[in-house]
Image (cartoon, grey):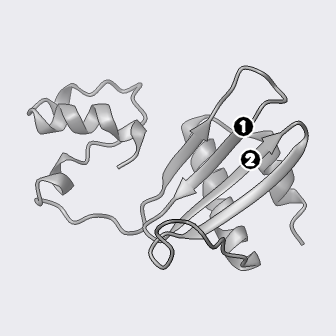
Amino acid sequence: LGSLDFAPTLLGLVGHGDLVPDRFQGDDLSGVIRGLEPADESRAVPFFRFTAEPDAYQARGLRTARHLWVLATEAGATTRTCHDVIADPFQLDPVTDPELDRELSGRLQALLADLGHPWPPLDDWIGALP
């Protein structure tokens, strides 16, 4: 359940899932919460950190059932972090895996495009992958 899913899910939980406006980008997960539907283990939830200042810290990320992958920029520097949230729930030991980076960054890029929020630093980072 990501922040985009809060409003549609709350409306679904109170019996008004049919009133979710089309402009809402999240999903009604009330059936999953009630145990009426299985959870989608392949689901990915976006992570956003916006600031008004262009050189201030900005981040976009993806949370799956197993991983948290985040790309951040600040003052022209770009950093990437990945954690296995099952093996390392306190996120103390970052994962370094180029194939996983390719997979998760590609999923994030597609998700942001679907949401209408492409992010040029992510596109540049993916473009620089070997």
User: Is 64 located above or below residue 110 in the figure?
Assistant: below
Task: Tell me the crowding category of disc 1: few under 14, some 14 to 19, or many 20 or more residues within 10 angstroms, Cα based.
Answer: some
Image position, residue 91 (x, y; %):
55, 66
Specify the quadrant of the image occupied by residue 48: top right
**Residue at 81% from the left image edge and 59% from the top image edge:** 126
- The amino acid type of the residue labelled 1 equals Gln
Residue 76 in view of the camera: yes
- The amino acid type of the residue labelled 2 equals Ala
For disc 1, the marked residue is 58
Would you say 78 lies left or right of 23 here? right
Task: Tell me the crowding category of disc 2: few under 14, some 14 to 19, or many 20 or more residues within 10 angstroms, Cα based.
Answer: some
**Residue at 18% from the left image edge and 46% from the top image edge:** 30
Q: In the rendered structure, are the residues bearing label 2 and label 1 in contact, judged by CB atoms less than 8 Å apart?
A: yes
How far apart marks 2 and 1 lie (CA) works out to 6 Å
User: Is 18 located above or below residue 46 in the figure?
Assistant: above
Residue 26 in view of the camera: no
User: Is 37 located above or below residue 71 in the figure?
Assistant: below
**Residue at 31% from the left image edge and 24% from the top image edge:** 21
Image position, residue 35 (x, y; %):
12, 60
Count of marks, rendered view: 2
Would you say 7 lies left or right of 108 here? left
For disc 2, the marked residue is 72
| SS assignment at label 2 | strand
| Quarter of the image with the C terminus in it | bottom right
Q: Earlier in the sequence, mark 2 or mark 1?
A: 1
User: Is 94 located above or below residue 48 in the figure?
Assistant: below
Label drawn at residue 90: none
Image position, residue 72 (x, y; %):
74, 47
Specify the quadrant of the image occupied by residue 39: bottom left
